[in-house]
Amino acid sequence: MPDFSATFPPRSAHVETRGVVFFARQLDKIRLHALGKLPPDYNLGFNRDDTFDARFCRFWGVDFDALTARTLQGGTDEEIFDAVFAGRLPLNGEQVRAWNAFLRKRGLRDECSPEIAELKAERGWADRDEIQTYMDYQDADEGRTPKYG
């Protein structure tokens, strides 16, 4: 068993590690999965090509299995981030801004907007205008107030 603790739910995707959103949440999901505490309806890794995990790995050129192995070795989010990005060019500010903007706005006036509306309706939240994106939905679903709501 890995030598770390993890609590459910995972942190908000808004939490930044070295300025990058979502990384901390991805680590939480990896840790929770290893401890048998991640519910099966949570996407992890490449179970679908359109998950935030899969998109993160493709966008940043990170091998998910290597990220998982390094995460399970333990360490802070920053230590894991630094190890995963070691030997590469320093993070490009434009890439960080593009990645963060993409995730923060995913579901807002794009091809995923109908799915956000459907998810909200299933939960009885059709009138919750503060839920506009996947990140908003995840926060609300896990009991947090959407950041920009």
Image (cartoon, helix red, strand yellow):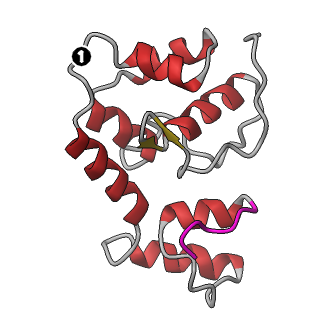
Q: Which residues are magenta?
A: 143-149
Residue 106 appears in the figure: no
109 or 11: nearer the viewer: 11
Q: Position of residue 16 (x, y in %)?
A: 50, 42
Above or below 73: residue 126: below
Q: Position of residue 134 (x, y in %)?
A: 50, 63
The image quadrant that residue 103 belongs to is bottom left
Foreground of the two, 80 or 8: 80
Q: Position of residue 64 (x, y in %)?
A: 42, 24
* Front in this rendered view, residue 53 or 100: 100
Does the stretch in magenta take in 145?
yes
> Looking at the image, is 23 positioned above or below residue 77?
below
Which residue bears the numbered disc 1? 88
Q: Secondary structure at mark 1?
A: loop
Query: Residue at image x 30%, y 43%?
Result: 96
Q: Quadrant of the C terminus?
A: bottom right
Q: Residue at x 27, y 10 (%)?
A: 87
| Image quarter of the N terminus | top right
- Percent of width and height locating residue 71: 57, 18
112 horizontally vs 38: left or right? left
